[in-house]
Amino acid sequence: MRITTLFSQITLILVLTACAATVQAKPVTTHFIQGVEAFKQGHFQQAIDAFLPIAESGVENGNLFYNLGDAYLKAGQLGQAIYWYERAIPFMPRNADLKFNLDYARSLQIDDQPGQDTILTRVLFFWKDILAARTIQYLALGSNVLLWLGLGFLTFCSSSWIKAMTTGAMLLFLLVTPTALFQLYHTTLAPQAIIVADTAPIRSGRSQDATELFVLHAGTRVDVQEQTENYTKIAFGKEMFGWIEQKNLGIL
């Protein structure tokens, strides 16, 4: 398990830039350094208390989420650790340390997790395991713009290089757009979530008095079907459904 000592200068600049609209740079830098130092000294809850306000301010950064996952795992909070590792994955899908830590955390889960990706989805949407989600989005958007520009230019000029550019843009568009749409589907129309509490009762309705249908445990991934102010309706596999308190869940 690894935490970046002071993060790379590039990561720090990116985070501070992202924070500029919501949090002053000096407090963010202070939180960063305090979190890193606390982790190095074995004060994992203090590290969490330093990193979490940055994440809750709206910053989206893979290294930040990864380090939060490490701190939670060291603090013995498995559900939160898996939740933050899962949030880090779309930003750095090829990071070997992150994948190793996530796999290790998953091995500690109690519930048997139903299969998430079929062989077909892994083949069709293989880009999500190679490129960051935003990179895929930018490639899909950029190739779409180039494709239409190329088609527009071809109506006036049949230059070979314009044909080559248009063909390349079309191929890139066809390769990355399905993955971009797949990711958009899962973040907007069919979001998923992680059980962050050690144990979470799933009930037949939106109250403590509703019948307890089954219990899920830390780190389990579920499908989100409906959200209200205090409760969320989830599906676990194809046959298990029910309502869970929002505080026991982390939406991805």
Image (tube, rainbow, N blue to C red):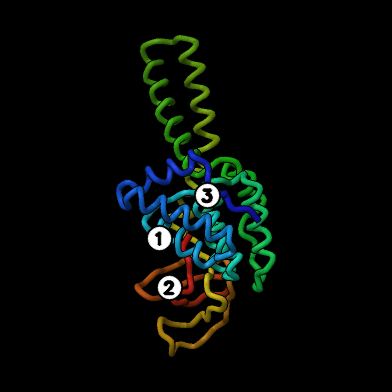
Q: Nearer the viewer, residue 132 or 225?
A: 132
Q: Depth-wise, is mark 2 or mark 1 nearer the camera? A: 1
Question: What is the quadrant of residue 128 in the picture?
Answer: top right
Query: Which quarter of the figure has residue 100?
Result: bottom right
Say which residue appears at 52% left-offset and 55% top-offset. Answer: 36
| Image position of 150 (left or right of 67) | left
Which residue is at a point 42% across and 25% down the rendered structure image? 146
Q: Residues within 10 Å of mark 3 (few under 14, many from 20)?
A: many
Earlier sequence position, callout 3 versus callout 1: 1
Locate residue 222, reporting x and y percent. Answer: 54, 67
Q: Horizontal placement of 78 versus 242: left or right?
A: right
The CA distance from mark 3 to mark 1 is 15 Å
Q: Circle 2 sits in a helix, a strand or a loop, which is it?
A: helix
> Which mark is drawn over residue 63?
3
Q: Amino acid at mark 3?
A: Asn
Q: Residue at coordinates 64% horizontally, 52% vertically from top-left?
A: 99
Report if the CB atoms under discs 2 and 1 are less than 8 Å apart.
Answer: no
Q: Position of residue 65 (x, y in %)?
A: 51, 55
Percent from the top left, x then y, of residue 42?
59, 64
Frontmost of labels 2 and 3 is: 3
Image height check: is 125 above or below 229?
A: above
Q: How far is mark 2 from mark 3, CA to CA?
A: 26 Å
Report x, y in % for residue 245: 44, 77
Kindly identify which residue carries mark 1. Answer: 53
Please indicate, yes or no, whether residue 192 appears anywhere in the rendered image. yes
Q: What kind of element bears circle 1? A: helix
97 lies above or below 243: above
Which comes sooner in the sequence, label 2 or label 1?
1
* Circle 3/circle 1 CB separation < 8 Å: no
Residue identifier under label 2: 246
Determine whether label 2 and label 3 are within 8 Å by CB.
Answer: no
Q: CA distance from mark 2 to mark 1?
A: 19 Å
